[in-house]
C-alpha cells in the first residue's frame, strides 16, 4: 500500500513511525514533512493547506489511503477533496471539522445537547465585549472563535488582562480573521486531561489518557504554547471518571454531531477539566493532539492503519483498540524564545541509538545535516513500566541531544507523579 500523510510536525512523525509497523505498507509520503520525518518517509514540498496540489499528487501517485492530520486542512475540506477522487481518508470532512474550526459552534453544540462545559457568552462587537467584562466574574477565559495554532486562548486573571486579550483578538487582529468573533467563558478549576478517541460516527473508542504541559516555563509559568511535553496515562483520569465521560460527554458528542448532519469520522480529541462538579469539556479538536500523540501512539498495541481504516469503513465496533499497560513521557526540546521569537538554522546533534524515540517537528535537512527550523524542534519520548522511570529515561535522552539555543522544561510529568503517588 501507498500511504499519504498530510502535515509536517511531531504529531505526523509519530503517526508515520507507528504506521511503519504495518508490513503491508510499501511507501509513506509526507506532505510537506520535515528534515526529521524524511528519515522515515518520502517528503514532498507541498504545503498542508495546498489542497489542489495534494489531491493532484495523490491521484498521480495512485495513493491507496490518506491521513489528514492537522486542523487547517481538515477545516478547509482536504478530506472532502480527496474522497471526491475516490481516495479513502482518515479524518473528518469539513462539516464535522467545524467542531474545532469554530469555538462558537462547539460551545453552542454543547449547550444545545446538554454536554457539560463552562458557561459562556459570544461577541462579534468589541465594545459589547469590553462592556460585558466590566462586570463579568474574574478570572475568565477569552477564546478566538477560529483556528489560531493552539494559541488563541487567554486565561485572564485580572479585568485588565481580559480587556487586553479582547483588544488583541478583535482590534489588533493578533489571530487574523479567527478573532473576529470571540467566546468569553467561565474560568474552570481542576486537573486537565486530554483524551483522544477513534470514532466512525457510530461508535467511539477512547485512547489512553494523557496530560499536556502548555506553559513555556517550569511549574506552569510563562506563556501558553502548543505544548512543552506530555505524559500518559493521566493519573487523575480514573476508571470511574472515564465511565462518566463516556456517558455524559463522548457518546453524546458523537450523537449530537450525527443529529446536526455532521457525522464525525476520525480522531476526536476531548480537552477536559475535572472540576468539583464533574468533568467538563474545555475544547474539542478534530484531530490527533500535538504533543499528546507522541505519548499515546507509542503505547498503542493495535495496528494503527487497521484502526484508521475501520474508522473510514465504519467497522470500528468490530475492531479492538488495545494499549500497553505502561507509561510514556515526552519532553519537547524547543528553540529559546519560543513561542514568541527565536533563531533557527542550528545543527542538531543526536546519537543514533536514541533516534527511534524522537519525533521531529521544526527540523530541516541541509547538506546531510539536520538543522533547527521552528519553535518546537523535537519531542523525546520514553516508555517504561512506571511513570517515574519513563520521565527519567526521557531526560537522560534529552541530555544527549544538542543544538544551540535549545530549551526545555525540567518538570514534565512531576505533577502527575505526585498525583499517582497519593
Image (cartoon, grey):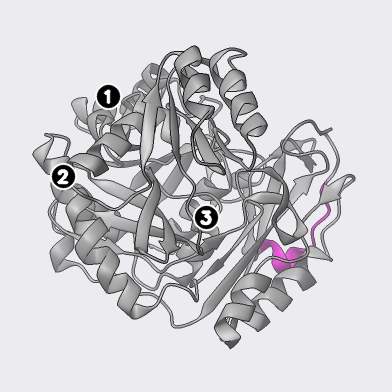
Percent across and percent down for residue 280 are 36, 56
- Give the answer, above or below, for where 113 lies relative to 132: below
N-terminal of the two: label 1 or label 3? 3
Which residue has dot 3 on it? 14
Query: Hey, which quadrant is residue 125 in on the image?
Result: top left
- CB contact under 8 Å: marks 1 and 3: no
Residue 98 is situated, as x and y percent measured from the top left of the image, at 31, 31
**Camera sees residue 400:** yes
135, above or below 420, in the image = above
Nearer to me, 200 or 350: 200
Mark 1, residue position: 81
Q: Nearer the viewer, residue 387 or 324?
A: 387
The foreground one among 251 and 201 is 251
Residue appearing at x 36%, y 62% in the figure: 279
Magenta-drawn segment: 348-355
**Mark found first going from the N terminus, 3 or 2:** 3
Which residue is tagged 2? Answer: 256
The foreground one among 396 and 388 is 388
Amino acid at each position: 500500500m501507498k500511504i499519504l500523510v498530510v502535515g509536517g510536525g511531531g504529531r505526523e512523525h509519530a503517526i508515520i513511525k507507528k504506521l511503519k509497523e504495518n508490513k503491508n505498507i510499501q511507501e509513506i509520503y509526507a506532505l510537506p514533512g520535515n528534515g526529521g520525518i524524511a528519515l522515515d518517509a518520502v517528503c514532498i514540498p507541498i504545503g498542508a493547506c495546498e489542497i489542489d496540489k495534494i489531491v493532484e499528487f495523490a491521484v498521480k501517485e495512485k495513493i491507496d489511503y490518506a491521513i489528514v492530520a492537522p486542523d487547517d486542512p481538515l477545516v478547509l475540506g482536504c478530506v472532502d477533496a480527496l474522497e471526491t477522487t475516490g481516495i479513502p481518508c482518515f479524518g473528518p470532512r469539513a462539516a464535522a471539522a467545524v467542531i474545532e474550526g469554530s469555538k462558537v459552534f462547539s460551545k453552542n453544540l454543547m449547550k444545545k445537547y446538554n454536554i457539560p462545559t463552562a458557561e459562556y457568552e459570544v461577541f462579534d462587537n468589541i465594545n459589547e465585549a469590553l462592556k460585558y467584562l466590566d462586570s463579568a466574574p474574574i478570572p475568565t477565559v477569552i477564546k478566538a472563535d477560529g483556528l489560531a495554532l493552539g494559541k488563541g486562548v487567554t486565561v485572564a486573571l485580572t479585568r485588565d488582562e481580559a480587556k487586553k486579550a479582547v483588544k488583541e483578538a478583535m482590534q489588533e487582529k493578533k489571530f487574523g480573521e479567527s478573532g473576529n468573533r470571540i467566546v468569553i467563558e467561565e474560568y474552570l478549576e481542576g486537573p486537565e486531561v486530554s483524551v483522544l478517541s477513534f470514532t466512525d460516527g457510530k461508535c467511539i473508542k477512547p485512547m489512553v489518557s494523557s496530560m499536556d504541559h502548555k506553559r513555556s516555563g517550569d511549574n506552569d509559568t510563562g506563556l501558553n504554547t502548543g505544548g512543552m511535553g506530555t505524559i500518559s496515562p493521566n493519573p487523575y483520569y480514573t476508571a470511574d471518571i472515564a465511565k462518566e465521560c463516556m456517558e455524559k460527554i463522548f457518546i453524546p458528542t458523537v450523537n449530537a454531531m450525527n443529529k446536526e448532519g455532521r457525522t464525525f469520522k476520525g480522531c476526536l480529541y476531548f480537552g477536559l477539566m475535572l472540576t468539583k462538579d464533574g468533568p467538563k469539556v474545555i475544547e474539542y479538536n478534530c484531530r490527533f493532539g500535538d504533543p499528546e500523540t507522541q505519548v499515546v501512539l507509542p503505547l498503542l498495541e493495535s495496528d494503527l492503519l487497521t484502526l484508521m481504516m475501520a474508522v473510514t469503513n465504519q467497522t470500528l465496533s468490530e475492531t479492538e483498540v488495545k494499549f500497553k499497560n505502561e507509561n510514556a513521557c515526552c519532553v519537547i526540546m524547543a528553540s529559546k524564545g519560543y513561542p514568541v521569537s527565536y533563531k533557527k538554522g542550528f545543527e542538531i546533534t543526536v546519537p543514533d541509538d536514541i533516534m527511534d524515540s524522537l519525533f521531529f517537528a521544526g527540523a530541516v535537512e541541509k547538506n546531510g545535516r539536520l538543522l533547527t527550523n521552528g519553535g518546537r524542534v523535537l519531542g523525546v519520548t520514553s516508555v517504561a513500566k512506571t511513570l517515574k522511570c519513563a520521565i527519567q529515561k526521557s531526560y537522560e535522552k534529552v541530555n544527549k541531544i544538542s543544538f544551540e539555543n535549545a530549551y526545555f522544561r525540567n518538570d514534565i510529568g512531576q505533577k502527575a507523579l505526585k498525583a499517582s503517588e497519593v
